[in-house]
Image (tube, rainbow, N blue to C red):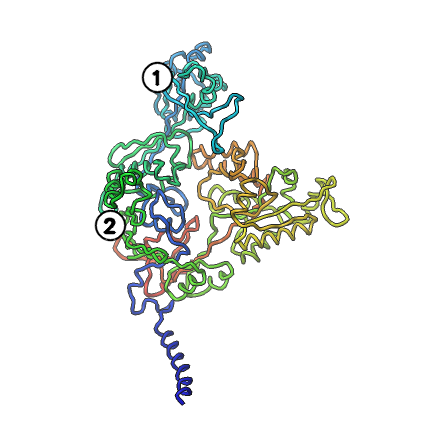
Amino acid sequence: MATKRFLIILPLALIGLLLQSFFWVPTYDNQAKGNPERLIKFIETSSGDARMLNPVLHADSASGNIVSKVFDGLLDQDDQLNLRARLAESWTQYEEAYLTLAPDMIAGENLPASPEAWFSYIQNQMNVDSKWKANIQSIEVVPGRDFKGSVQVPVRDDKNQVVKENGRPEMMAVEYTFRHPPRLKFKLKKVDQYFFEPLLEVLGKDYVSRFPYQQFITAKIPAQRELLENHYSEILQVTEHNPVLIFQLRKGVRFHDSHEFDSGDVLFTYQAIMDPRNASPRTSDFEPVKSAEVMGKYQIKFVYKRLFSPAINAWMMGMLPEHLLNAEALKKEARDKNLSDMQMESFNLRDSDFNRNPVGTGPFVFKEWKSDQFIRMIRNEDYWEGPPEYQEFVMRIVTEPLTQEMEFYSGAADNYGVLPHQVARLKTDPKYQSFSTVGFSYSYIGYNLRKPLFQSPEVRRALGMAVDIDKIIKYVLYNEGERVTGPYPKMTDWYDPDIPPVPYDPEGALRLLNKLGWKKNEEGWLEKDGKLFEFNLITNAGNPLRKSILSIVQNSWRKIGIKCNTQVFEWAVFLKDFVNSLKFDALVLGWSMGTDPDLYQLWHSSQAGPNQLNFVGYENPEADRLIVAIRQEYDKAKQIEMTRELHRLIARDQPYTFLYVGKSTRLLDKKIVIVERQPDGKEKYQKIYPTKGGNIDYYFTKWRKLNFVPQFSPD
């Protein structure tokens, strides 16, 4: 009898418990009932934990998400992807250009023999564009001087072969004495990569190559003179571009510990990056800096040793507090940890507790970090731009996508990155506001242009024409993607929207291949000179989208007689044995791009060797010229002209079959709005919207969750 009662009561108890749970557990609609603090806290889920909360050291997206809220940079990008001032109130760019004069080379050309005489010659006699002269703010003579130095050169054996140790060339220092001849220093109002061209028209276009370096550079050991010859132009720069960047800093900005931010912090941040002991991943961004000079508490000057227009973007990185991390502070921290003398000597920025307890100037103040659980921050009430609307920000570590989804549906998280197959259903759900934006990544099929099969642009175009890319977007991406035609992110000014995509035309592709001598044999395969049109298409494992692309393009090419074999490899093997070693026919991959127009590493012919990023081996002299000119150009309008020309060139050559850029879709509660404060003190609510770059977090400090759904007029 007791057993019977137990069997009756147990199911009823379970039903009661489930009913209680239904009414007790918060749901999306009632998440703030009885918990009003939920409205002032933004909770975000992340699939991975942060690693290091230091702006000069971190290298992962989870850390970057937190760092961007704790730290400010001198600059960042506005909603139109243009640079805007942040910790820097303003900035100025100009150029100091130097021309080294060798009197013996010019005295016989009816030109001024002395540097001083060049002033009037340039101003009065040089027949050049008035804009060129107008850009010269001042000219002065830099007297010659003597100094000593050394260069590193490879050690060679008796057979003149480079001596290697552990696979690397053994190096030796060759010392020299350098008598620098006088130079003309031009201060230019604007950076001009073509500034020296009119001067070299007068001096002779071969002026640099004819320059008598040997008259001014002497090896300390005469027998080593020949070793110096390859380094003459490095030691003595006949023409030298030195772009200058001066930041005027914002006054009254304070770190979270109330210490005022100033130019010393900027200088310290730069020095920390360049200190090899810290092994910062951002060293290459600041390597072009020639010198740094504090010009006052709120002003700092950086001189660059060469033209490199992307350099300014590096200053969007967060600034460090010098008073907490300088040598004295690190020594004190090491002493407090009771480290040995040897440990204290090697103690550096990477060892500091600061990396888990950061102090910045940003809108949120770091409070707590429980590894693999959450990171919590509170708003900075003293933020220079005004405190954020949210009083608290929490990043919770939720590794499983399904759990992230459930957390959002229950109201335990405030945003959710929607999977492609969910978009059609969720973007119309009245509970949420949905944002679908194109990203900075694109996918492509890359061809190894070293292979005879792929050396013809017409062959590569035919391969693209045979693939129905719209079908890939529809069935693989659930329409969450768009066609792309070239190497730049689609939403940037560098991308040329007028370039049409390669059309889907398999019959036209076959005609083009037939014209090139490829004819179908009895088995239906394309053949030329006794060789089949056959190759291997590979990609990496762990990416179902790329695996689907393999199948679709293989089938598409088979229909016109191309025999394509597909293989998938584990990522490490894929990179080492195929991509980095250049031992592949064709591959499916993607690039995640930034907003900078510099494509040197991806497309310049000098970057086409093993372990480099131009692994398809694209070589085009005109593309090389444009790529170098783009990274040396400081006028955005001119950059746009050149990037679009480069886009057209690459689209014509088709080293890739450009596929698509995927969309990123995020959901937010409709109660979250942008709060705009009016001059009379009243508040105005505005719908959240993505920026030109697809960023919906741009106005995050103005976000607030209301306790009702606001009504907006139709767009």
**Amino acid carrying mark 1 in the image:** Asp
Q: Is residue 569 shown left or right of residue 145? A: right
**456 vs 483: above or below:** above
Disc 2 crowd, CA 10 A, few/some/many (<14, 14-19, 20+): some
State which quadrant residue 129 falls in. Answer: top left
> Toward the viewer: 561 or 300?
561
Q: Residue furthest left?
A: 258
Q: Between label 1 and label 2, give the one nearer the viewer.
A: 1
Q: Which mark is residue 535?
A: none
> Toward the viewer: 461 or 112?
461
- Residue 514 screen position, x and y as percent: 72, 43
Labelled pair 1, 2 in contact (Cβ < 8 Å): no
**Amino acid carrying mark 2 in the image:** Asp
Q: Is residue 178 shown left or right of residue 465? A: left
Residue drawn at (56%, 56%) of the image: 476
Q: Residue furthest top?
A: 108
Considering the image in quadrants, where does the N terminus appear?
A: bottom left
- Residue 16 screen position, x and y as percent: 38, 79
Q: Which mark is residue 146?
A: 1
State which quadrant residue 23 falls in. Answer: bottom left
Q: Is residue 15 shown left or right of residue 489? A: left
Considering the image in quadrants, where does the C terminus appear?
A: bottom left
- State the SS at label 2: loop
Disc 2 designates what residue?
382
Q: Residue furthest bottom?
A: 1
- Residue 326 screen position, x and y as percent: 26, 39
